[in-house]
Amino acid sequence: MVKPTVVSYRAAVIALVFMGVAAFVVLSRSAAMTGTDDEAAVREALMQSTLSFEKNDVAMATKVWANDTSLTVFESGHANYGWADYGDNHLVPEMAEMKNTKYVLTDLKIHMAGKTAWATFKYTISADVSDKGKTRHVEGSGLGTAVLEQRSGRWQIVHWHSSAPRRAPAAPVTQ
């Protein structure tokens, strides 16, 4: 029987440390890549949402918004609770009256926490709006926050809050 030497113990310890460091590096890169992939998927879901609005495409929106009662939307002082409420009383009527819509998110900052993500952003929107048989062009901008959850492998918006700056009061009418 051969007796182990101090050199063979050192070699074994060094080999174990090296393997541990190598495993750590591989796992860290894998986690970082997954985080990057998830962040890209969240960004894509948000871009799909804006595109669905530009195209007046409710079916496209259903792919990135939670289609159940967990959805909450706060916009301009109004609240919608659940997909049915949001779709019926907000999204579909708004899409019906807006044409040639341009909707852009900028300054997008995404934060990840497991299967939950939240994003802050600035937005601009412009569209031609039908109003009493006449068309007028509208433009707006503001800030927003979106919360998304990963459900069945897809990132879906479960909460949306956007607000626009207060408008200056109308000038008094002089006679």
Image (tube, helix red, strand yellow):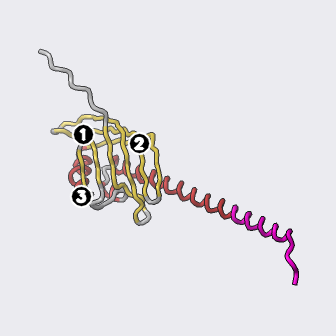
**Quadrant housing the C terminus:** top left
Q: Is residue 7 left or right of residue 50?
A: right
Which residue is label 3 attached to? Answer: 84
Identify the residue shown where x is 37% and y is 49%: 146
Amino acid type shown at disc 3:
Ala
The answer to whether residue 65 of the structure is visible from this angle is yes
Give the magenta range: 1-21
Identify the residue shown where x is 47% and y is 59%: 114
Q: Which mark is residue 129?
A: 1
Q: Are marks 1 and 3 in contact (CB under 8 Å)?
A: no
Q: Which mark is residue 50?
A: none
**Where's residue 147, x and y in %?**
38, 52
Is residue 20 shown in magenta?
yes
- Asked whether 72 or 140 is in front, the reply is 72
Name of the residue lying farthest toward the bottom: 1
* Quarter of the view holding residue 8: bottom right
Find numbered disc 1 in the image and state the secondary structure of the residue it sits on: strand
Name of the residue lying farthest toward the left: 175
Identify the residue shown where x is 69% and y is 61%: 21
Identify the residue shown where x is 40% and y is 58%: 149
Is residue 58 shown in magenta?
no
Q: Is residue 139 left or right of residue 27?
A: left
Find numbered disc 3 in the image and state the secondary structure of the residue it sits on: helix
Which residue is label 2 attached to? Answer: 121
Crowding at dot 3, Cα within 10 Å, few <14 / some 14-19 / many 20+, comes out as: some
Q: Is residue 131 above or below residue 34?
A: above
Amino acid type shown at disc 1:
Val
Looking at the image, tell me whether mark 1 or mark 3 is earlier in sequence order.
3
**Where's residue 166, x and y in %?**
28, 32
The answer to whether residue 47 of the structure is visible from this angle is no
- Asked whether 123 or 126 is in front, the reply is 123
Q: Are marks 2 and 3 in contact (CB under 8 Å)?
A: no
